[in-house]
Image (spheres, rainbow, N blue to C red):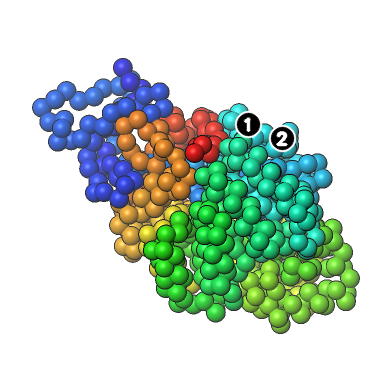
Amino acid sequence: MEDLVIRDADVVDGSGADAYRADVVIDAGRIVSIVKEAAAAGCQRPRARREIDAEGLVLSPGFIDMHAHSDLALLRDPDHSAKAAQGVTLEVLGQDGLSYAPVDDRTLEEVRRAITGWNGYGDDIDFDWRSVGGYLDRLDRGIAVNAAYLIPQGTVRALVVGWEDRAATPGELDRMRRLVAEGLEQGAVGLSSGLTYTPGMYARDAELTELCRVVGSYGGYYCPHHRSYGAGALEAYAEMVALTREADCPLHLAHATMNFGVNKGRAPELLALLDGALEAGADITLDTYPYTPGCTTLAALLPSWASEGGPEEILARLTDPATAGRIRHDLEVTGSDGCHGVPVEWETIEISGVADPALGDLVGRTVRESADLRGEAPWDTARRLLVRDRLGTTILQHVGHEENVRAIMRHRAHTGGSDGILRGSKPHPRAYGTFPRYLGHYVRELGVLTLEECVAHLTSRPAARLRLPDRGLVREGYRADLVLFDPRTVAPGATFAEPRRLPTGIPYVLVDGRFVIEDGRRTDALPGRSVRRTPL
C-alpha cells in the first residue's frame, strides 16, 4: 500500500492548463498515480496508509523561490517557517554575486563582513567548507526545503583579484574561469552577479562575457543584479541581454524592477526590449517580488570608489571628514552608482535592521525621520550609523511603482522570487509573504493573473529555467514537492508593521513526499537537500 493519497483535490498542475479534480497518490517521495474524478467513476478509488481530504483545496507543485537569501538561514534555523509556510519547496541561493563559496580563509572573512546585513555575521555557523561542492554537501545533511546554488561572481573576483577597482589580468581571468567551471561541475546551476555591489561591480563586460561563456557551455544560466535599476535601468537591461547573447548563455534577470521616479510607468519599455530579444532567439527569464519597496544594505548605496578595498577601507573613508564629504556629494547631488545613479532621497530609506542591538531604536524610521529627531542632517545620521553598525545595517527603499510591478508580473518570461532577507528586527515582509501575496492579492483580489497562470509562474517556469526534469509539475513520476492551499483564504500574514507573521490558507506542504507543514503547523522534518545542476 502506498504512503499517501490526497483525495478530491482541485489540481492546478503547473502547466497553465485548467484545474481538474483528482486523487493523487504518493509513495517513496514521488507521485505514483493521478486518478481524475471522471476516470474514477464506478471504480475502486486508490487507497494508501494515510489519506488527506483535500475538498476545497488546490493541489499544486511546490513553489520555487528564484531569488532567496537563505544561504546561512537554512543552516542556522532548521524550522525555516519563513519559506516552508509559504509553500516554497526549493530556493535558489548564492544571489547578487556574494555568498560563501568558493572561498579561502581570507575571502570568507571578507564576505562574512560584507554581507552581514543580509545573513548575519555567522557566529553561530561552523564554516566547515570552502568549495561549492562542500557547501552543497553541508546542505545535504538536512534542511527544511530544497536549495540550488549560483556561483557568486563577486566572491570569485574577491578570491582571485581582491576588492580593487581594476581589470583582471589574463592569468586572473583564467583562474576565475576555472573556479566557475569547478563550481558548475560540483553542482551549481549558474552564476550570479551584483553589479552595484563591490567587488562584482568592478568587472568589465568583457570579463563577465568570458565567465558567461563557461556557464553557457555547462548548461547553466547567468543571473545578474545588473548595473542600475534607476537612472540607467533600460541601458543596464540591454547590456545584460547583449552580453549573454554574445556569450551564448541563458539569462535570468534578478528582481526585474523599474524603480525610482525616473522609471514611473516605464515597464512597457522594458517588456518591449525583452520581447524583441526573445523573438530574436534569446533565452531570457526574470523574477520579481510582488511589492513596491526594495531591500538592501545601507552601505550598498555608497559610490563604488568609496567601497574599493573592502569593508575596512569603507569604514576608514567614512571616518575621514574630507572623504566623507565627497561621499555625501555623490549620494545627495550626483547620484552614486550604488544608488543606481539617482540622488538619494533620505525620506525613502527606512532602517529595517541593525547588527548592533544598541542601535535598535532607529529601526522602523526613515533616515530623515531619525535625523530630524536629532536635529541634524540626514547624511550625518547615515554616516554615524554606518560606522557604529560596521556596515551591518539593512534598509527598505520605498522607490517602486505598482503599475510597473503588475505589468512585469504578467510577462511570459516571469517567475517569482522573494529576494527575502531574513535578518533584522523589521525585515521586508516579502521574506515571509511573497508567494501567498501572489495568490491572494494579485490572483483572487485583483485578477492580474488567473490562478493557473500564477501557479505556472511559480512552479514549472522556474523548474524549466533550472533544468529540473522531475519538478515543477503535478505529474506521475515527478517528485512529491507539493502544496495544498485554499484559494479563498490564502494570504500573507506578514505586513510592514509585523513582517514575521506567517501566511494563512496553506495547511499542507510536502518536500520529497514528507510533510514540512501539516495542519498549518511546521513539523520537525528536514527532507530538503541540495538540487544540483543536471549535466548536459
Say if mark 2 contacts mark 1, CB within 8 Å. yes
Q: Residue at x 76, y 80 (%)?
A: 329
Left or right placement of residue 241 versus residue 298 in this view:
left
Location of residue 469 by image quarter: top left
Q: Amino acid at mark 1?
A: Asp
User: Which residue occupies the foreground of this view, 451 or 218?
Assistant: 218
User: Does residue 404 appear in this view?
Assistant: no
Q: Earlier in the sequence, mark 2 or mark 1?
A: 2
Location of residue 244 by image quarter: bottom right
Q: Residue at x 78, y 53 (%)?
A: 161
- Residue 498 vs 327, above or below: the answer is above
Q: Which residue is mark 1?
A: 137
Q: Which residue is mark 2?
A: 129
User: How many numbered tags mark residues here?
Assistant: 2
User: Which residue occupies the foreground of this view, 156 or 216?
Assistant: 216
Q: Residues within 10 Å of mark 2 (few under 14, many from 20)?
A: some
User: Does residue 250 appear in this view?
Assistant: yes
Q: Secondary structure at mark 1?
A: helix
- Residue 284 vs 13, above or below: the answer is below
Instruction: State how far apart marks 2 and 1 are (Cα).
Output: 9 Å
Q: Residue at x 46, y 42 (%)?
A: 467
Residue 123, position as x, y percentages in the image: 76, 41
- Residue 439 vs 230, above or below: the answer is above
Q: Secondary structure at mark 2?
A: loop
In the rendered image, the residue lying farthest to the bottom is: 333
